[in-house]
């Protein structure tokens, strides 16, 4: 929310020109994403652009959702179709967004803390915010909103009643920090540390240190760790020593810390500039957390907090699960777990995530008190407005102050004093196919509510990182022309990831097409609210009616298949759009070159609309087959020309799969088909590093046994202890998709970050691993694959491909979807 401005002022602030004037209105909200529109009658939509993105494409969607003011940098050809809308033309929409952020910042009279560095920014922000909120109402960047777009969106979340705002600043190339500094205009800066992230944009680490240091321009104080030499050098050369506040675990800095780790608590001794001493304690012992805490302590002291107030705040700190997770709940409900969050901007992010899901019935919010000082009627009134805008059906409020939300005609509400009171009220039978967002302060222990509402399944889980999926999608999007469409393969349970959730996320990413193997997969997606066009690759004759009923587009792969579908359409008076599979050398399914004359006769006779022509490449993933792949692609073009010559329109053409996009981008044609690459596996080996694995398969230790040398383990006594030691039985077997070929030392898992080889045969529901040299306990987490265990390496070890391992994961394995 921004300070209210009229249209004329809006144009002046953004250096724009009003080219179409609609109804006069006051603007209080800025929107850059047409999927997340609230308070539309008071909003301006800014059509940001990028290398493969143009926000102007979503003006129609925003207009349909009642937005009437737009900032654009190119004039739409159909601009006069938008009745009563206002269009402001600017040179650069990103600069316009940032100009509004500067306007908002200049009207905030409180203190602003800017945090930069390579690592720890978000943790420092969250922990510092938790302590500061014990005395002041604060605003802070949602999650990791620290970019050229993220910072303005964070600033728009600062309200007049806030006393302190904490904003992150992240950069990837020279020149960016100057822009962020103008928007943030910090009173206090914390420079966390410096690492190699985004180093590709800078010649040296010192260059990056100097660029980041520009956040301190105009600040009253800058906090940094003196041990980080590039940081120290950049700051001490650029700024007057009077504004620099350094700390270290060595002598020679303003604040000197000494750390002593104990079995339960870590003591942090502090020597202040006046040589007074104070000892803090915390529950953390890892170096990264302790460095972050030292930054937080120094910042709190600089802001006038007493040592005792800081120590009380340190007791509130816990490891942060910086992500939203989507979990299967009881009675076919879905749970969004956001139990770490307790501020208004974070609530908006969670509600945005909720907005793009597919509730079959009610949208329910479980919300705690806001614990920051000053969280009074004004804040809870904002909460009530948010719940109305996001069309929440029912609120369960927990705490003493949440009742200030009050009764509202737009949603129903119930209130409970404590989390235990909510749980013991036996509400679980009232939930049925609902979408439930659980979000609140850590002190309310809402994880108990999530556990209470969660569907009971065994301890093996497949975690799907939707941010990583977005990253991979955009990686391939940037590899092709802006005009080239993307069809995404979600067959085989979306490569094991879960088709509905993956498809819904792709729908939000504006994918052009989805593809499934069988008709029932497409029907399921339609039933789950997926509206994207869906191609069905192997439809049976028995499924033709379902194809028509659910607006699915079948692949026709033979002349006989064409006749069967054509006759069905004539008999049932239906029109079904089709995709033609052309066999250029795969020799699996498809119509051959020799059959094209007969195909053209069928096309003329049945007049089925042809959406696309496509082929499969047999060896795009291997360089050795390059000549054959090029032959296939040229043959495909020849075949499409022979077909198109008999049509009055041009069907889409597509041949490239994930590997083909990397190896043969010159043949991208009208559309590409993205499959295994979306899931983080670059099968050609040419560009591994840019992709992110989206899946992590985890299980738990059921039991630990101590065995003697020579004792045997498992069926057929295949496992033999070569020395005295320990084994762990873990809760995953071949019925879960853990391949039996991993038996007898071929496979391994990670426990406490160490390799534990499989010992004996993999069983149906469990597996034994050797943990002789690993400290572990029953119930501990076990990494089957994910960070530290490459799926491609695992597949190679048993002579298969990643596709097989992904698609074999059983449906009984719980899928958890999250954004971080």
Image (cartoon, rainbow, N blue to C red):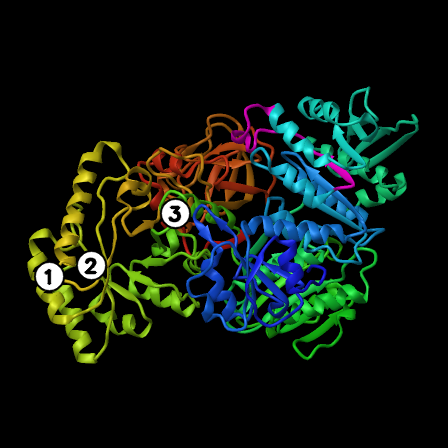
Q: Mark 3 or mark 1, which is nearer the start of the sequence?
A: 1
> Can you see residue 743?
no
The picture places residue 688, in percent across and down from the top left corner, at: 41, 35
Q: Identify the residue at image location x=41%, y=44%.
A: 478
As for residue 48 lying within the magenta part, the answer is: no
Q: Do the residues labelled 1 and 2 touch (CB within 8 Å)?
A: yes
Is the stretch drawn in magenta largely helix, strand or loop? loop
Which secondary structure, mark 1? helix
The picture places residue 130, in percent across and down from the top left corner, at: 77, 48
Which secondary structure, mark 2? strand
Whether residue 121 is situated above or below residue 25 in the rendered picture: above
Mark 3 — residue? Answer: 806
Task: Identify the mark at residue 322; answer none if there is no mark.
Answer: none
Which contiguous range is marked in magenta? 186-205
Mark 1 — residue? Answer: 599
Mark 2 — residue? Answer: 580
Mark 2: few/some/many CA within 10 Å (<14, 14-19, 20+):
many
Whether residue 799 is situated above or below residue 9 in the rendered picture: above
Q: Identify the residue at image location x=88%, y=29%.
A: 272
Residue closer to the observer: 707 or 156: 156
Mark-to-mark CA distance, 2 and 3: 28 Å
Residue 190 appears left or right of 100: right
Residue 498 appears left or right of 227: left
Mark 3: few/some/many CA within 10 Å (<14, 14-19, 20+):
many
Q: Mark 3 or mark 2, which is nearer the start of the sequence?
A: 2
């Amino acid at each position: 929310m921004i300070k209210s401005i009229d249209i004329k002022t809006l144009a002046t602030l953004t250096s724009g020109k009003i080219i179409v004037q609609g109804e006069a209105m006051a603007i209080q909200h800025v929107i850059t994403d047409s999927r997340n529109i609230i308070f539309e009658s008071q909003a301006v939509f800014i059509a940001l652009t990028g290398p493969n993105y143009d926000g102007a494409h979503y003006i129609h969607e925003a207009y349909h959702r009642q937005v009437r003011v737009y900032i654009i940098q190119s004039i739409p050809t159909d601009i006069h179709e938008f009745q009563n809308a206002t269009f402001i033309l600017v040179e650069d929409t990103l600069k316009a967004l940032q100009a509004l952020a500067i306007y908002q910042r200049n009207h905030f009279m409180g203190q602003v803390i800017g945090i930069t560095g390579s690592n720890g920014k978000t943790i420092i922000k969250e922990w510092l915010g938790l302590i500061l909120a014990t005395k002041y109402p604060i605003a802070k960047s949602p999650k990791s909103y620290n970019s050229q777009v993220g910072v303005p969106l964070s600033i728009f979340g600062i309200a007049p009643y806030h006393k302190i705002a904490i904003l992150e600043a992240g950069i990837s190339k020279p020149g960016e920090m100057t822009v962020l500094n103008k928007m943030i205009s910090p009173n206090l800066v914390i420079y966390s540390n410096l690492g190699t992230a985004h180093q590709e944009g800078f010649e040296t680490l010192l260059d990056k240190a100097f660029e980041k240091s520009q956040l301190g321009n105009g600040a009253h104080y800058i906090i940094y760790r003196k041990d980080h030499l590039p940081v120290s050098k950049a700051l001490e050369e650029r700024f007057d020593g009077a504004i620099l506040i350094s700390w270290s675990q060595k002598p020679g800095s303003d604040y000197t810390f000494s750390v002593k780790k104990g079995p339960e608590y870590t003591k942090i001794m502090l020597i202040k500039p006046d040589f007074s001493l104070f000892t803090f304690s915390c529950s953390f012992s890892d170096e990264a957390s302790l460095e972050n805490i030292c930054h937080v302590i120094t910042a709190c002291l600089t802001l006038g907090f007493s040592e005792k107030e800081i120590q009380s705040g340190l007791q509130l700190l816990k490891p942060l699960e910086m992500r939203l997770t989507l979990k299967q709940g009881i009675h076919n409900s879905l749970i969004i777990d956001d139990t770490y969050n307790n501020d208004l901007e974070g609530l908006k992010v969670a509600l945005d995530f909720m907005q793009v899901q597919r509730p079959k019935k009610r949208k329910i919010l479980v919300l705690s008190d806001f614990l920051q000082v000053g969280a009074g009627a004004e804040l809870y009134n904002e909460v009530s407005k948010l719940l109305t805008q996001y069309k929440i059906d029912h609120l369960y409020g927990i705490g003493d102050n949440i009742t200030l939300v009050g009764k509202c005609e737009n949603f129903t509400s119930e209130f409970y004093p404590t989390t235990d009171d909510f749980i013991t009220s036996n509400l679980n039978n009232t939930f049925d196919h609902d979408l439930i967002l659980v979000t609140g302060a850590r002190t309310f222990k809402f994880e108990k509510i999530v556990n209470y509402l969660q569907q009971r399944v065994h301890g093996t889980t497949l975690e799907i990182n939707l941010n990583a999926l977005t990253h991979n999608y955009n990686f391939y999007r940037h590899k092709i022309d802006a005009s080239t469409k993307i069809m995404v393969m979600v067959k085989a349970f979306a490569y094991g990831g879960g088709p509905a959730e993956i498809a819904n996320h792709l729908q939000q990413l504006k994918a052009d097409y989805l593809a499934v193997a069988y008709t029932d997969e497409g029907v399921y997606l339609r039933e789950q609210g997926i509206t994207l066009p869906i191609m069905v690759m192997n439809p049976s004759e028995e499924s033709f009616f379902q194809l028509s009923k659910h607006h699915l587009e079948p692949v026709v792969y033979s002349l006989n298949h064409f006749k069967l579908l054509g006759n069905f359409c004539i008999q049932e008076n239906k029109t079904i759009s089709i995709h033609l599979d052309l066999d250029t050398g795969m020799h699996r399914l498809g119509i051959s070159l020799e059959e094209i004359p007969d195909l053209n006769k069928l096309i003329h006779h049945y007049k089925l609309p042809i959406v696309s022509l496509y082929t499969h490449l047999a060896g795009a993933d291997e360089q050795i087959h390059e000549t054959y792949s090029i032959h296939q692609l040229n043959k495909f073009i020849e075949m499409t020309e022979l077909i198109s010559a008999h049509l009055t329109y041009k069907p889409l053409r597509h041949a490239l799969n994930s590997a083909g996009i990397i190896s043969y981008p010159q043949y991208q044609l009208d559309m590409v088909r993205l499959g295994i690459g979306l899931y983080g596996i670059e099968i050609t080996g040419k560009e591994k590093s840019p992709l992110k694995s989206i899946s992590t398969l985890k299980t738990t230790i059921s039991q630990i046994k101590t065995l003697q040398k020579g004792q045997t383990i498992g069926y057929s006594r295949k496992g033999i202890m070569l020395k005295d030691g320990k084994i762990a039985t873990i809760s995953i077997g071949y019925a879960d998709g853990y391949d039996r070929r991993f038996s007898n030392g071929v496979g391994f898992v990670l426990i406490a970050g160490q390799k534990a080889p499989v010992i004996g045969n993999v069983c149906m529901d469990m597996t034994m691993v050797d943990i002789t040299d690993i400290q572990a306990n029953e119930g501990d987490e076990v990494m089957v694959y994910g960070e530290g265990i490459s799926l491609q390496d695992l597949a190679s070890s048993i002579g298969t491909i990643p596709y097989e391992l992904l698609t074999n994961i059983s449906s009984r394995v719980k899928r958890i979807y999250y954004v971080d």
